[in-house]
Image (cartoon, grey):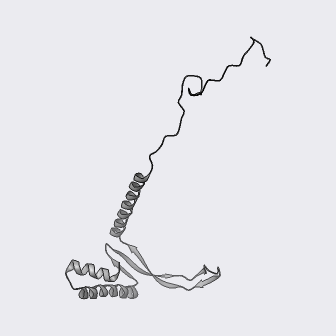
Amino acid sequence: MTKKEIVKTISEEIGLTQLKTKEIVQKTFDAIVTTLVEDGRIELRNFGVFEVKKRAARKARNPRTGAKVDVDEKYVVTFKPGKEMEERVRQLEEKDRQGRLEAEQQSAPPQQQPYSPPQSNDGPGYPSAYPSPPNPPSSGPGDYSG
């Protein structure tokens, strides 16, 4: 969403002109930046905390050449979302997870049972579809010839 879209949405909800709403939105953004520069921190309840932090100098690597480079210390703006925002994002994650599970269940082929041949009492481990092994002929007790 762009600032222009924010202005349009707020203008329609409140009933102000887009010009007046744009002025209010810009003043709000300006106040946030001014407070960050002067105080280093601004807390917007139920939204989050913007804070200026100093990032220490460090060694880095140029991804193209692989050469080591020095990165100077610098100030960066960080944002920590408030509890309400965190909760609403978690709800969005949960809805997304539920939607993916439902889509997977609808598109997945039915589960097939692994093949197991029919069993019978023809002998241990021999299914009825196969003949039992023949007994070897014997000429009598003690005949070990073969």
Q: Residue at x 49, y 82 (%)?
A: 54
Among the 4 quarters of the image, the one containing residue 132: top right
Count of numbered circles on the image: 0
Could you say where residue 123 lies in the image, as x and y percent from the top left? Answer: 59, 23
Q: Between residues 110 and 61, which one lies in front from this camera angle?
A: 110
In front: 41, or 96?
A: 96
Instruction: Please indicate whether residue 130 sits to the left or right of residue 140 in the image.
Output: left
Residue found at the very far right of the displayed protein: 145
97 relative to 122, above or below: below
Residue 16 position in % (x across, y down): 20, 84
Q: Residue at x 36, y 86 (%)?
A: 35
For residue 12, above or below residue 89: below
Examine the rendered structure and indicate whether residue 29 appears above or below residue 102.
below
In-front residue for pair 143/34: 143
Quadrant that contains the N terminus: bottom left
Q: Residue furthest top?
A: 140
Quadrant including the C terminus: top right
Residue beneath the point at 41% across and 80% down: 51
Quarter of image, res 72: bottom right
Tell me if 13 is positioned left or right of 62 in this view: left
- In percent of width and height, residue 31 lies at 33, 87
Q: Is residue 64 above or below residue 118?
A: below
Q: Position of residue 55 (x, y in %)?
A: 51, 81
Q: Which residue is situated farthest in the left direction here?
A: 15
Q: Residue at x 24, y 88 (%)?
A: 20
